[in-house]
Amino acid sequence: MLNQKNLAYLENLMTDQTLIAVTKYVGDKEINELVNAGIKDLGENRVKKFLDKYEKHQDKAINWHFIGHLQSKKVKKMINKITLLHSLDRMSLADEIEKRREKPLPCFLEVNIANDPNKYGLKPENALDFYNKIKEYDKIKVIGLMGMAKHTDDKEIIRENFNVLLKLREEFNREYNDNKVTKLSMGMSNDFEVAIEMGATHLRIGSFLFEEE
Ligand SMILES: *Cc1c(COP(=O)(O)O)cnc(C)c1O
């Protein structure tokens, strides 16, 4: 069930971030509780689970965020049902979205800020070049950068990781100066305090929001 106390703690800490409640571990009951608590932005990382939940909760005004790795072959069946994509990380995916999406989709470029070979995301040094190739796409509107810090209790490492995203945003702004790539999707249950401190605009929080019955 929804942990009301943790939600209150988080909302109290937030300045003007958008809270995306990640529902991948929970079911319909928690979605109802979130909506009743005024949370309209929900996140999922698997296409099948997203589609199930989307269908069941169509009667509600939910903004669905897709936050996980997205296979190109699955784009068609889900891309017109989401509000925002946090995991744009390659040309083949951009091309498929350009083909399938009906109206412009706000997207974050996912960057592998922890420099972890097992994680998805653009290498920081390739992000500008990637953006250059897709910035004229009609159906893709890049609004910012997304990253996941290493899962650790060491706040210095978390800061270093998030700082890669901040530095990269500076580079984007120096290069383009068009005020388009401005948002930062960073901060999960383990590190939202640091993320808020460092200027995150979108938080993606799952486990911290829920508790066992
Ligand atoms: C699961 C997930 C989250 C939320 O994780 P928690 O640690 O449970 O808060 C955030 N972002 C992505 C991409 C995820 O897959």
Image (cartoon, rainbow, N blue to C red):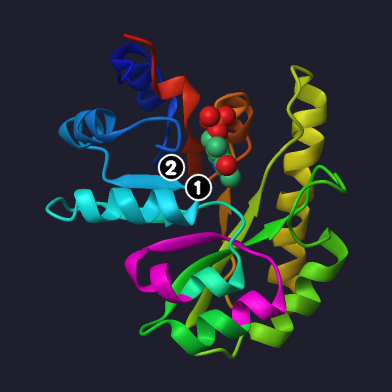
Residue at x 43% of width, y 42% of height: 17
Q: Looking at the image, tell me whether mark 2 or mark 1 is earlier in sequence order.
A: 2
Find disc 2 in the rendering and name its residue: 17
Label placed on residue 201? 1
In the foreground, 15 or 162: 162
Q: Which residues are magenta?
A: 76-94
Q: Residue 140: image x %, image y %? A: 51, 79
In the foreground, 4 or 166: 4
Residues marked 2 and 1 touching at CB (< 8 Å) = yes
Q: Is residue 59 left or right of residue 137?
A: left
**As shown in the figure, which amino acid type bears the numbered disc 1?**
Thr
Q: The residue tagged with tag 2: helix, strand or loop?
A: loop
Q: Residue 160: image x %, image y %? A: 81, 36
Q: Residue 60: image x %, image y %? A: 15, 50
Image quarter in which the N terminus is found: top left
Q: Is residue 108 left or right of residue 153?
A: left
Q: The residue tagged with tag 1: helix, strand or loop?
A: loop
Q: Where is 211 relative to 203, above or below? A: above
